[in-house]
Image (tube, grey):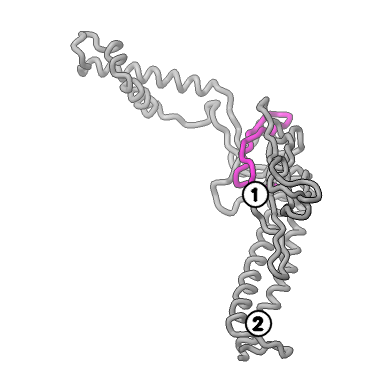
Amino acid sequence: MIELPGGLVLSSTFHAIATGLTSLLTLWLLYRMFSRLRRARWVEDTPTSKIRSAAQGLVELNGRVDADGHAPLISPLGGRSCLWYRFTVEEYRRSGRSREWRTVERGVSDRPFLLRDDTGQCWIQPRDAEIHPRLRRRWEGRRRWPLSTGAQTGVLGALLGRRYRYTEEWLQQDDVLYALGWFESRGGGREAMDPQRIARQVISSWKADYADLLARFDRNRDGQLDQLEWEQVRAAAASEAQRQMHSAAQAPAVHVLGKPPHRGLPFLLSDHHEEHLSRRLRRQSGWSLAGMLLAGGVAGWLWLALIRG
């Protein structure tokens, strides 16, 4: 048994668990405080770029989201037309005197969508992004999936059915979007291309249909390609490689914003204004600081009791 300051007595096992958990919580809140603050500084200090002139690497963009003519997504809980969604389904559970909401379903869409500004367009790949949407709805019901029809309703459902809470967030067509992430341009002559590698790929694809290859290059019709004929194959493949490279250089560049390849760099998407997002991140850092001080005080109190005991 461990006696805490103030006369409270705890079992050794419970004291050890409580000490460990509060210490870990303190360290996690310390990390969260600095990570939120660092993200706020990234938002404040990164200059906004235009899509057409954005440098390769970490950039900040502002524009409007667009589906590029594709059919919109339909959110699974509210059936809303959108370009991105995130949802959570919680079930209300009772165990003795304990009452809690426990998450039973959650999900997030990862289909790319377009960000447009007055200079061009950029594909946003939202997978692994930290997203702060403005549009959010929370409500309750008696079905695990609120759009389904196979559940009890009415008074009987209220008495016997389970209780669920739904939370859904989404981005929709023409929403203003702030984006901070890793910008890359592909095609349009921007990528270095190896003509020899492309020629080898062309020859490999021709070999897949060897009968056609013989029909094109077996000049003496002996059923095989001799050294001179193979030289003709390689020359034709080199010419095809040059044609493909020229075609790729003429194609318009495709811009993509996604998760940075280097750890520690941010990937943020938000339909809040940049200043509002910065304040929100700083508030989260402040709350983390307050929680860290509280958890640290409890952890220190428990460690002091352990040392004295």
Marks 1 and 2, how far apart at CA: 36 Å
**Residue annotated with mark 2:** 302
Residue at image coords 69%, 42%: 150
Image-based side of 23 in relation to 229, left or right: right
Which residue appears at 62% of the width and 73% of the height? 21
How many numbered circles does the render carry? 2
Q: Secondary structure at mark 2?
A: helix
Amino acid at circle 2 = Leu
Residue 106's disc is: 1
Label 1 close to label 2 by CB (< 8 Å): no
x 32%, y 19%: residue? 209
Residue 70, horizontal then vertical, whole percent: 66, 27
The answer to which of marks 1 and 2 sits earlier in the sequence is 1
Q: Is residue 111 magenta?
A: yes
- Residue lying farthest front? 156
Quarter of the rendering occupied by the N terminus:
bottom right
Which residue sits furthest top? 220
Given this view, does label 1 or label 2 mark the residue nearer the observer?
1
